[in-house]
Amino acid sequence: MEIISNLTVAFGNELTSPASLALILFGVMVGFTFGATPGLTATMGVALFIPLTFPLPADMAISMMIALYCGSMAGGAIPAILINIPGTPSAVVTTIDGYPMTRNGRAVEAYGWALVGSVVGGIVAWVALVSLAPALARLALKLGSAEYAAVAFLGLAIISSVVPAPLIKGVLATVIGVGLSVVGFDQITGEGRWTFGSLQLTRGIGIMPALIGLLVIPELMMTLFQRDAKVVAPKSVKGMFPTATAFAGQFVNMLRSSVIGVVTGIVPALGGSVGALIAYDQAKRFSKNRAEFGKGAPGGVIASESANNGVTGGSLIPLLTLGIPGDTVTAMLLGGLMIHGLQPGPRLFETSGDIVWNILAAVLLANMAIIVVGAIGFRFFIRVLDVPKHLLAPALFVLAVVGTYALSNNWFDVVIMLGLGVFGFIATLAAIPVYPMVIGVILGPLLESETRRALVISGGDWMTFLTRPVSAVLVILAVTILVLPTLMKLRQIRADRSASAHANVPTEE
């Protein structure tokens, strides 16, 4: 009852404050812009807008930044669906089914599902945030290095198996991505790895240069060789939102994916990419039409986007209750909270309860604003399909270069991005998927650091991953995902050979 009374007061404060509502709406609009623009990120958006919040009251300032965070996660689906270029790292999974739907003339349907999934994921995350925050945060703290490493391994196993390519190519691409992630100084010994004597490479390969290079540049290069390949923009956005029957049919998928996103967001350092991968895998596993996944299945888009926005609320739980940022965006939000005199941690609700409940109310309002901004804005976003791709490609290329440079004001990042772009283009021509490479770059550092930390704690005993129940279950599940398809394929080959042999046996007259 205390929660309900606090929320009632908070919603009354928010809904009767035109300035607060305007800032939330503004934050969502800015977030959509950053999410829909490859090269710009939610982290960059929050960082740029923190100085602008200095004159604002603490609750309004943090509410606007959280709204920007939620809006950017939803906006990342726009380029992922329309032009096969993820606007955010977690939108990589959305491209797997989102762009095929666009090519099949179902862009409006794909985006409608993405928008609905984002809102449902955000609402589920909000419910968890206001009701289960302390308990879930304590649960996350009980996980150790072995569990974190096992989760990263599971994520890599999933992406290796779910891409529409032979498993061996998926595994190869994942290994390449993990290999790229270890470039730079060793995290423990401090020695250079694969730096080839370059001081610039000692910093390693950043996630955004890798994402833009491996996903954006190959797509642009393919466009130059396929000038006649044009996706026709829909004449209207009619039918964007699903019918009640269709919504009911996907509700379990949305709810399951949202919960996966929330749980993933609670665990620090995992982020939206892992949540989207696990949710996509589960959606495919429980779907009656598994063959459609990778070819334009709405369930794939729904799973990815529901998990993405589930992560936003989930990552706020350890931030507000323990002062632990779950990803780079919440690390920026941590700085914003402290700048405005709020100290995240167990005592935050006691010392600044009124402000915190106002912020929690704003989180729900931001997620509700997503569907308004997204529905209205898509009428303009979809016009990008009317631009001939050979004219759009140079503009996106310039934007990719500028966005990469703006991340750290370092031209070497641009060189890395272009080099990986050429490599990604060659891999695409060889039918080697590039999505696992990006996920490998994202999860590689987590896998390495937590694996080595677990081994140090256990005295070098690799059995620690199997003696701890949670990590053992995750490792066994990951190995099963990698091995089971091969065993089933071998079994099918033997069955076919046996049937063929029996068919060729001459019968006695």
Image (cartoon, grey):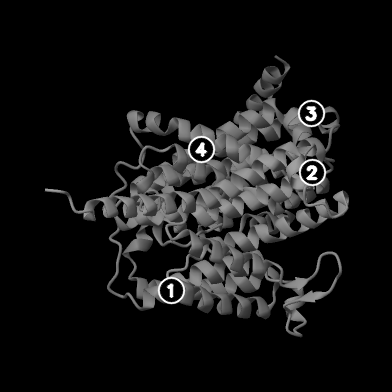
Q: Secondary structure at mark 1?
A: loop
Q: Amino acid at mark 3?
A: Gly
Alpha carbon separation for disc pair 3 and 2 = 31 Å
Q: Amino acid at mark 1?
A: Ala
Q: Which is in the foreground here, disc 3 or disc 2?
A: 2
Residue 40 in sight from this viewpoint: no
Q: Which is in the foreground here, disc 4 or disc 3?
A: 4
> What is the quadrant of the N terminus in the image?
top right
Q: Secondary structure at mark 2?
A: loop
Alpha carbon separation for disc pair 4 and 3 = 26 Å
Q: Nearer the viewer, residue 456 or 351?
A: 456
Q: Secondary structure at mark 3?
A: helix
Residue at mark 3: 353
Residue at mark 2: 144
Pick whichever of labels 3 and 2 is earlier in the sequence: 2
Q: Amino acid at mark 2?
A: Gly
Q: Quadrant of residue 183?
A: bottom right
Q: Position of residue 279 (x, y in %)?
A: 53, 42
Pick whichever of labels 4 and 3 is earlier in the sequence: 4
Pick whichever of labels 2 and 4 is earlier in the sequence: 4
Alpha carbon separation for disc pair 1 and 2 = 39 Å
Q: Residue at x 81, y 42 (%)?
A: 323
Residue at mark 1: 430
Q: Is residue 62 left or right of residue 391?
A: right
**Residue 269 — which label?**
none
Residue at mark 4: 119
Pick whichever of labels 4 and 1 is earlier in the sequence: 4
